Every structure is written in C-alpha cells, then in structure tokens.
Image (spheres, rainbow, N blue to C red):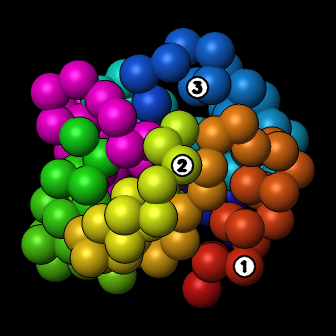
Amino acid sequence: MSPPVVLVADDDEDILALLRLRLERAGYEVVTAHDGHEALAAAEARAIDIAVIDVMMPGLDGHEVVRRLRARPETASIPILVLTAAAHETVAEASAEAGADAHMRKPFSPKELVARLEELRP
C-alpha cells in the first residue's frame, strides 16, 4: 500500500523543510508548494490525500487555495488543515468559511500537527 500523499503549501522554506522531515518520518509522501499557485498546480498534477495550507502566502492566499480545492471535484473532499500566524479568531472563522477542516496557529508543535492530520485522515 502506498503512503498517503500530503500537500504542504507555505512560503517559509524552513517550515516546508521541517514539515517534510516530520511528515515523511510519520509515513507520508510529501509534495511541497511555495505559494498558492504552486499548491493548486500540485493538486492538479497528482492525487492528494490531505493538505496543509498556510494562510499568508504571496499570490493566492491560503483561504483562496482552500476555496479552489473545494471547488474541484477531484479535491473537494480531501481533509485540509490551515496554518496561520494570525492570532485573531476571525482567521479561524475565515478558514472554516473557506472550507478548511481544521486550523492550527504558528508556532506549532510538529508532533501535534502530525496528530491532527492523523485525526483528519479518512
């Protein structure tokens, strides 16, 4: 059985490297994107099982990426966790309205993030 594929989109190279390392150790195949446009292109190029999307990215922000993933039949039902550095509750509400299944604030515990993804996986 092949490992689940997780799309990780964040414009911070350090966060991408950290998440790739931790998620690969947890048994995921990781596809990374540096912005919203790359994230959508990656989701079109291959089947994604779950996604971790940063809110504040250049080009398309994370909420728009979530809306567009939800609009595509191929990605409409994948679990999506949104990462945000913003502390305002309105960001969590906006994430939910966009269609995210969960959100976490930065800084985050990589161990907790992996646990949240395991909870979200079908």
Please identify the quarter of the rendering in which residue 115 is found: bottom right
In the rendered image, is residue 96 in sight? Answer: yes
The residue under label 1 is: 119
From which residue to which does the magenta span run?
A: 36-60
Indicate the position of residue 60 as horizontal and vertical percent values. Answer: 16, 37
**Mark 3 crowd level (few <14, some 14–19, many ≥20, 10 Å Cα):** some
The residue under label 2 is: 87
Compared to 42, does 15 lie above or below? above
The answer to whether the residue labelled 2 contacts the one labelled 3, judged by CB atoms less than 8 Å apart, is no
Q: Residue at x 37, y 64 (%)?
A: 90
Residue 16 numbered mark, or none: 3
Dot 2 amino acid type: Ala
Dot 3 amino acid type: Leu
Residue 106 numbered mark, or none: none
Q: Residue at x 43, y 47 (%)?
A: 53
Of labels 2 and 1, the one closer to you: 2
Q: Is residue 58 magenta?
A: yes
Image quarter where the N terminus lies is bottom right
Which of 1/39 is in front?
39
Dot 2: element: loop
Mark 2 and mark 1: Cα distance apart in space: 23 Å
Indicate the position of residue 98 as horizontal and vertical percent values. Answer: 24, 70
Q: Residue at x 53, y 38 (%)?
A: 85
Indicate the position of residue 118 as horizontal and vertical percent values. Answer: 74, 71
Image quarter where the C terminus lies is bottom right
Indicate the position of residue 37 as horizontal and vertical percent values. Answer: 17, 33
In this rendering, would 86 be left or right of 73? right
Q: Residue at x 14, y 60 (%)?
A: 68
The answer to whether the residue labelled 3 contacts the one labelled 1, judged by CB atoms less than 8 Å apart, is no
